[in-house]
Amino acid sequence: MASFINKLLLVFLILPNRCMCHESTLSLLKRHQHSDCPKSRLLDVSPNSPNFKLEVRIPGVTPVMSDSYFCTYVPVPSGQKSYIVDFQPHANMNTAHHMLLFGCSMPATHEDYWDCGIRYGTCLREAEIMYAWARNAPPTKLPPDVAFRVGGNTGINYLVLQVHYGDVSSFRDHHKDCSGVTLQMTFLKQPLIAGIYLLMSNSAVIPPNEEVVNADVACLYTQATIHPFAFRTHTHQLGQVVSGYRVRDGKWTLIGRQSPQLPQAFYHMEKPMDIKYGDTITARCVFTGKGRTTVTRIGRTSKDEMCNLYIMYYMDAKHAKPYMYCLQDGSPELFKHIPPEANIPIPYSSNMLMQGHHADDEKPNDNEIVQQPKREEEVVLDQVPHLEEVVNWPGEKLKLGQVSGVALDSKNNLVIFHRGNHVWDENSFDQKHVYQPQGIGPILYNTILTLDPVSAVALNAVGANIFYLPHGITTDKDDNFWVTDVALHQVYKLGSNGDSLLVLGQAFQPGSDSSHFCKPTDVAVDPVNGHFYVSDGYCNSRIIQFSPEGKFIMQWGEESSPSEVPKPSQFFIPHSLAFVPVLGQLCVADRENGRIQCFVAHSGEFLREIQHPEFGERLFAVSYTSDNGGQLYVVNGEAFVGKGVPVQGFVLNFTTGELLHTFKPTKQKFLMPHDIVAGDDKTIYAGDIEARTVWKFLPAEKAEHRSVKKAGPGIEMHEIDATETLIKAEIEGKIRSPDMPKEHKSKSVLKQSSTAVSPVIITLLLIIPVVMLVGIGVFIHWRKGKMYGDDADSKLESKQSSGGILGRLGGKNSRGLNLGNFFASHRGYSRKGFDRLSTEGSDQEKDDEEGTDSEIEECSAPPLPPTSSSS
C-alpha cells in the first residue's frame, strides 16, 4: 500500500493537482499588467475553413525563484469535437527548462496564471499529457490522419500549459516570459487518434560519483493495439541515454533510443511497429553520478533527476485512449536480456544542442517530427568480435605443472601461476583441511612466470621454494603479485623480483577468524585506495576486505545450502574475483552455484547476480575489462554427475549480464579451465589445470594477422632460441635465491637478447656462403679449362675426394654441402637452438660446446607424474 501511495505522489509531481498551500503567488513572481505577449485563448478561425489556431501562452511573467512552475489554461471550442494536428513551440532552453501541455475537464483554478508547483496543481481532476517540450526541441507535426481529440464528450474541455523555470539567472534583467505553444487544429473528424504513453521511474537512486546507474521501467500492455510513431526522452543533467523497447515472445524490439541532453523533441521512430495485448513495454534510463557529492533521487527540481520516456502513438478512433502510463520497476530477470546498446551513451556536441526552435521570431519549421540527429562520432560498442584460439601457443617449449592462475601485468604480459611437480588430489587434505604431504617441502621451481604475450618467451621467473599448492593470482598497478596457496592457507604479496612484501594467514593452519584462512582462492586489489579482497574460499565461503597494510576491515558471505536455492551473498566456493574499478564493484565467481555475484566492494552490499543456463552447475573464474563499455569473461566446468553443458568461455555485457559470445579451443578441448584473464587489447587467456597449459584467444580479425608461427622459419627459430636460453639454464636444485644481484640478472637478460638472431642476419649468413661458393666454382671451372682441358670434370672430382676446398666444406666422405656442420665447426655455436624444440626431461643437459653459463633460473618444470582430480 505504501508503495502505491508513493507512486501516486510521484505522479502528482508530473500531473500536480490542487493542494492546500497558502504561500502567495505574488511572492514568487512579478506580474506584468501590460504584457506584450500574444494573447492566449484567442481562436484564429477562418470563416471558410474548418482549420484554426489556438494560442496557449504564459501571459508575461518574471519568476524570481529557481525551479518555479507556472501554469495557464485555455478552453477548447465548446459544443463539438476538435482535433489538434500540429504543435508549434515558442520557448528557449535558456529561459524554460521544459513545457508540458495537459488536457483536463477543469483547470486547478480559473486565474489567468498560477503557481502550479507549490500552491496549485495543473488540473482539478485527472490530467492527460498531450505534448512535451524541452531543450530547444523543434516543432512537432503529426502524421496525416492522426490527431489529438478534444472537446465534445472526450472529457477534455481545457488545455493547461505548465512551464518549469529551472534557473532564473536569465531573468536578472526582469524581462517578461511568454513561453507557450501554438496549436494547429481542425474540426474535421480524424480516423486515427493520437495519445501519449509515459514510462517513468519513481525509484532511481544515483550514488555520488557512481559511473553507471540504470533505472528500469516495464509494464504489461493490456489495451487495444497502438502504433507508436514517435518518442521523446527526458532526464535532467545526469542522464546519458534513454531507451525504450517492446518485448514480445522474448524478443526485444527498439522503440527509440536517444540522449536526453539533445533537444528533447519527439523523434520519428526508424521503423513502424505495433504494441498488442500481452506485449511488455520497457524503458531504461542510464545515469552517471560523476561530479555529484551527494545522492541524487527522482524529484521535481533541476538538482533532482527524472527518468521519463514518452511514446507518441495512434490507434483506431473507436478504441482511443489519449493517455496511458507505466510506473512499475522492471524486474532484473527481464532486463538481463536488454540489448547492450541501451547502455551506450550517445555523444553530442554544442551545435546539436542548438538544433531546433530557438526563438519566437524564427520562422516555424513545417517538417514533420524531426529525425534523430546524425551522430557520426557514436561508436557502436556492443559488437563483440568472434574469438579464435591461437593454435600452438605457447608451444611445447614451455612445460608447466597444473596451471591454477593467470593474470596480466601493466604491460599486458601474461603471468602464470603453476604447481610445478605438485598436484592436488584426494590425498592432499584430511577432513580438517590440513595439508598432508608437508614433508615433501615446497615446490623447487619458479611457480610465477611472466611471458611475452606474442612469442611466449619467459621474461621473468620467481616463486621458487615458497609454495605448496598455488591457486589464485592477480597483479596490482605496481606489478606486484598477489597470490593464494590452499595448502599453506595463506595470502602473499610478492614484488616482481620475488621478494615477500606481505604474508597473511598461518602456514598449514586452517581457520575462520580474521587472522586465518581456509584454502583461500583468489585476491582482487582496488587500484585507487589499495584495499584488497580475498575469497576464502573452499571452507569459509566468505569475502574479506583488508587495508593496503593487511589490516582486517570487514567480511561478508555465508555458505549456501545444497538443498535450497542459493540466496544473495551465499557462496558454494567463492572461487575467483574480478574488481571493476570504474564502479568500485567486486564480482565473484560462485563456483558450485554456477553464477556470478556482484557487490559494492567497500560495503559488501549485494547488487545482482548473473546466471545463464549455458553456465551449467559450475562456474570457475571471472575477469573484467572496460572494453566495449564493460565486459565480463568467464569459464565454466564439467558437471560432477551426468552429462552437463559444454565447457567453454563466455563473454558477457557487464551492465546487462547478457550473454554475447562463447568460445573454446578448436583442435583440442578445454579439460578443466581454472582461471581466465582478459586484456584491454582483447586478448584472452585461460589457464587449464588438467591440460597443464594456457589457452590464448584473439578476435578473429586480429588472429588473421598474428605473426607467431606464421612469419616464416626465421622468426620461429628466433623464438625457440630465445626461450631456450632461459629454460635450459633454470634447473632443479640450482635455483638462485630471490636476492640475486640485479647486475647479475641484467647480464643474463643481455645474454638472452644476444642469442636471439634476427631473421635478416640468418638470411645473410645463408646467402653469403652460397655466393662465395658460386664464385669459387666459377673460378675453379675457369682454372679447370686452363689446366685440364676436356678432362677437367673427372680430374676435379679426384681432386675434391682427396681433400679440396669443397671437400672440406662438405665434410668427411660427403659429396654435398652441410651448412649445419659448417656452422657447428665454429667455436661457441650449438645446433641445439635449431634442433631441440623441448627441454622436458633435459634439466641437467648442457651444450658441450658451451661453457657452464646457467645464471638464469629454470622456468619450466621437470617431468611430472600423471594426476587424478585437481582443483
Image (cartoon, rainbow, N blue to C red):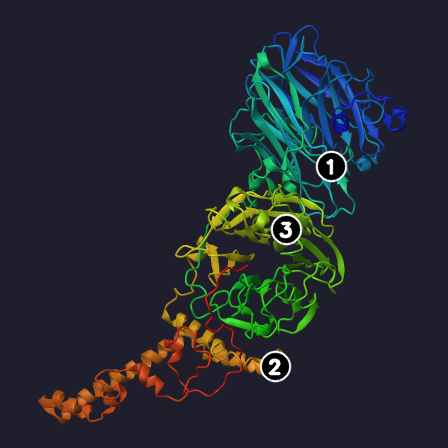
Q: Is residue 388 above or below residue 307?
A: below
Residue drawn at point x = 64 percent, y = 47 percent: 560
Using a 10 Å C-alpha cutoff, classify the residue at mark 1 as few (fewer than 14 neighbours), some (14 to 19) or many (20 or more).
many
Q: Earlier in the sequence, mark 1 or mark 2?
A: 1
**In the image, which is nearer the foreground, mark 1 or mark 2?**
2
565 and 763: which is toward the camera: 565
Q: Is residue 241 above or below residue 735?
A: above
Q: Is residue 759 above or below residue 427?
A: below
Q: Which residue is mark 3?
A: 587
Q: Between marks 3 and 1, how big is the CA–CA gap? A: 28 Å
Which of the numbered marks, if any, corresponds to residue 740?
2
Q: Earlier in the sequence, mark 3 or mark 1?
A: 1
Residue drawn at point x = 25 percent, y = 89 percent: 812
Secondary structure category for the residue under label 3: strand
- Expressed as whole percent of the image width and height from the top left, the position of residue 405 reads 56, 62
20 and 94: which is toward the camera: 20
**In the image, which is nearer the foreground, mark 3 or mark 1?**
3
